[in-house]
Amino acid sequence: MSENNLFPRRSEIIKGNIRDVRDSVARPSLDTFYQVNFSFGKFSTWLKDSPVKDLAVKRSQGRNFMQKMSILCTQAEIPGTSYVESTAIGHHQGIQETFPNLRNFPPLNLVFYCDADMIILEVLETWMTYINPIQTNKRSLNAYSRFNYPDDYKEIIHITKFERDTFIDPNKNQSGSFGGRSNDRKTPREYKSNLTSYEFVNIWPTNLTSMRVAYGDSNVLRCNVQFAYDRFFTRFDYQDPNQAVLNTSEGIINSNDQQVQPFPVRREDGRFTTTGTTSILPLGGV
């Protein structure tokens, strides 16, 4: 019987100086560069009775509540996933096989710094109260609750991971060092990191943990929230969302357009001019 050739060969073992792998080892991902985007599209339903839903209110310091939640989200999680497997015995004599049966998505845990205006708590409490509101007088002895439809309160959240060099112009010159000596000659950047995003579909809060307050040394009040969701999608190494053309060169502009850009039109003399306009609408949640 011939020898199995699938085992790694000597030539496949990385050897040599550390400088051969310096570019790979020196570019780890740092856990402090991220942003959570609360891409809420139904907040006008479950947040309708709260003044926080109005954009740029004074309590939000001129920002809408979703932007303030993004700023104050101090901890997030890049999600994992697992499979529930099934075991098959007897397909092959003496061999036990396993196959995937169901894919599980663990809950998402976020930690917020609570602002002095308590906007974070108000949004989360209102969201969870809408899921199962009291249908009668809140102080009534015979009060009862009834769940609302999931389509009215399930939302979308994005977690975007970026790096230190993501927003640096790659055409901008840079200086560095090599072998302990400074390199005064500036060279353009050859590569930079792009964005990586996770989209959580049909997400809703399941557990708002208690927050301890006590006399003594002052600490920033933190709010821990656990979310459940149906699934998540991932997009790696992208710069910006895609763009779709919504109208034609006849000048018909859709009412949902967000911006208008000129496009070249060929004249009778064969030259091009930018007299036409087309509207583009960003797609995606980031």
Image (cartoon, rainbow, N blue to C red):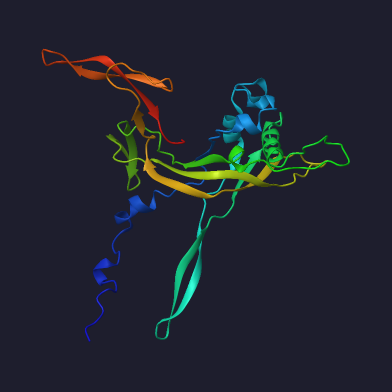
Q: Is residue 182 above or below residue 27?
A: above
Q: Residue at left 70%, top 35%?
A: 126
Image quadrant in which the N terminus is located: bottom left
Q: Nearer the viewer, residue 166 or 120?
A: 120
> Quick check: 104 left or right of 214?
left
> Quick check: 52 left or right of 106?
right
Residue 103 placement (x, y as % from top left): 50, 59
Residue 146 placement (x, y as % from top left): 73, 43
Residue 207 placement (x, y as % from top left): 68, 48
Name of the residue lying farthest toward the right: 141
Name of the residue lying farthest toward the left: 269
Q: Where on the picture, by quarter, is residue 121?
A: top right
Q: Is residue 11 above or below residue 113?
A: below
Q: Residue at left 39%, top 27%?
A: 281
Q: Where on the picture, by quarter, is residue 208?
A: top right
Q: Nearer the viewer, residue 47 or 161?
A: 47
Q: Residue at left 33%, top 23%?
A: 247
Q: Nearer the viewer, residue 281 or 16?
A: 281
Residue 17 placement (x, y as % from top left): 30, 59
